Image (spheres, helix red, strand yellow):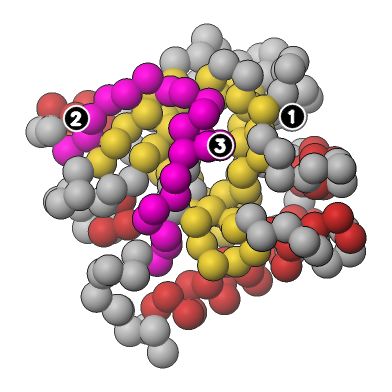
Amino acid sequence: MSSGWYLQRCVAGALCALLLLCGPSRPTSAAGAKSVTAIFLVARDDLPDPDPDFADSVVLVMNNLGPAPVGIIVNRPTSVPVSHLFPQIKGLAQVSDKVYFGGPVEFGSVWFLFRAAKAPAHAVQACDGVYLSADGDLLRQLLAREKPMDGLKIFVGHAGWAPGQLQAEIAHGYWTLKRAEPDVIFNGKSEYPWPSPHLPKRSI
């Protein structure tokens, strides 16, 4: 059995269960968050990392979610359509948007980035006009809009580093730092699907 098929089935199953059951969870409040410092990390295409899915990844990294950097990979779409997760929401039937692989940490947890004019409850600011949340009720509200995926991306898992680890990786030249721009999150090309098709298949 290929790892791609198996992992995609896991994504679909985990997301269906989590989105039906999850209530308010972290991040919980934009008002209580630390001052925002968010950047993009762009990985080398030959990144020497045990997890090859970081190669060519663009990661939105934030300082306001915990004691060490936390990030979301923004350019790794899976093959799982958002519409498959919410068959009861009729407006999603014609939506082709996919769920994204946010990173290998807490794989199965659901996060989403969305545009908003002001800070909503149960979300923290990621960068200008963009907020991050893991709240199921808020996500369902966004998906019930006339244009459900307008300024919205849904992710499974996230990226994370131990204290000092990311600084060391940057010093070794593994990552290039860029300014965090909302248009890159929502309008950028997602050229590197997950699991990466150009990588050798791993059996499970």
What percent of the width, then of the height, locates residue 94? 77, 61
The image's mark for residue 186 is 3
How packed mark 2 is, by other alpha carbons closer than 10 Å (few <14, some 14-19, many 20 or more), is: some
- Residue 105 visible? The answer is no
What percent of the width, then of the height, locates residue 122? 74, 29
Identify the secondary structure beneath mark 3: helix
Which residues are drawn in magenta?
174-195
Q: Earlier in the sequence, mark 2 or mark 3?
A: 2
The image's mark for residue 51 is none
- Tag count: 3
Q: Amino acid at mark 2?
A: Ile
Q: Earlier in the sequence, mark 2 or mark 1?
A: 1
Q: Quadrant of the C terminus?
A: bottom left
Residue where numbered disc 2 is placed: 170
Residue furthest out toward the bottom: 1
- Residue 77 visible? The answer is yes
Q: Quadrant of residue 124?
A: top right
Q: Amino acid at mark 3?
A: Phe
Q: Amino acid at mark 1?
A: His
Is 121 included in the stretch rendered in magenta? no
Distance in Å between CA atoms under marks 2 and 1 = 31 Å
Residue where numbered disc 1 is placed: 122
Distance in Å between CA atoms under marks 2 and 3 = 25 Å
How packed mark 3 is, by other alpha carbons closer than 10 Å (few <14, some 14-19, many 20 or more), is: many
Contact? badges 2 and 1 (CB < 8 Å): no
Q: Quadrant of the N terminus?
A: bottom left
Residue 121 in the figure: left or right of residue 47: right
